[in-house]
Amino acid sequence: MPLIEWGPKLAFGIRVIDHDHRMLVDIVNAFHDALRGGESHRVIGSTLDALQRYVREHFRREERLLANSPFPYLADHIARHHELERMVADLNTRWAEDPDSVDARGMHQFLKDWLVNHIQQCDAAYVAYLKDNAPGERPARPDNDAEPDSGTENDTPVSVVVRVPRGRVPTLRSAADVLADGGRRADQLEKLVSA
Ligand SMILES: [Fe+2]
Ligand SMILES: [Fe+2]
């Protein structure tokens, strides 16, 4: 049984956010499994790397969406994100340098509690403000704990490698952020480049 069960209590019915949260749940579960399975220091370290990267990616995406919404508590929300980012970065560094100093079992419980509480309390507070603005918003399905439906296949984020002049890299990154967030701005960008 996974440490955290994905289900209706964690899903908001906002596609881009649910996808990110589910990824975070999967990574925390993978960290837990790696510890329980007695995986190597390197394997556990790579799940922590993945967690650190995805936490940062998700938080920035969520903050961009909130900044474009009427959500009134953004500064406080960002502060909570920074707090977890610091803790995950610290955990990762300590694991790399001195794994014996890490209470790993206490840490996966902490990560579970933090993630579940943050989603159910802090993130839940913005749902009403995002419903009109978030990309891919759809009403929550009663069976929201089921696998994502096939209609979302085209929306599944993928990594691509492209070659562009060095000076265009910041523009490319900004465009990728807009496309990853989806919604009206992504539609406008798509129209612009397809014209
Ligand atoms: Fe959040
Ligand atoms: Fe979140």
Image (cartoon, rainbow, N blue to C red):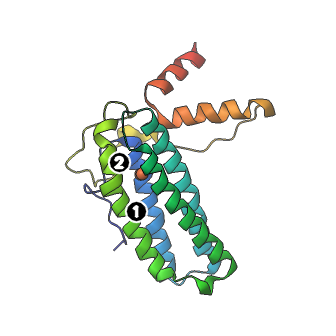
Please state the total of marks drawn on the protein image: 2
On residue 115, the disc is 1
- Residue 147, percent from left and from top: 33, 52
Pointer 2: what residue? 148
Image quadrant holding the N terminus, namely bottom left
**Residue drawn where x is 46% and y is 44% of the image:** 62
Give the quadrant of residue 97.
Answer: bottom right
**Residue drawn where x is 60% and y is 44% of the image:** 159
Res. 10 in view: yes
Looking at the rendered image, the disc whose residue lies closer to the viewer, 2 or 1, is 1
Q: Amino acid at mark 1?
A: Leu
Q: Are marks 2 and 1 in contact (CB under 8 Å)?
A: no
Q: Is residue 88 above or below residue 17?
A: below
- Residue 31, percent from left and from top: 50, 72
Q: Residues within 10 Å of mark 2 (few under 14, many from 20)?
A: few
Give the quadrant of residue 176.
Answer: top right
Q: Looking at this view, is 153 or 43 the one in front?
A: 43
Q: Secondary structure at mark 1?
A: helix
- Residue 55, percent from left and from top: 52, 56
Image quadrant holding the C terminus, namely top right
Q: Looking at this view, is 117 or 83 the one in front?
A: 83
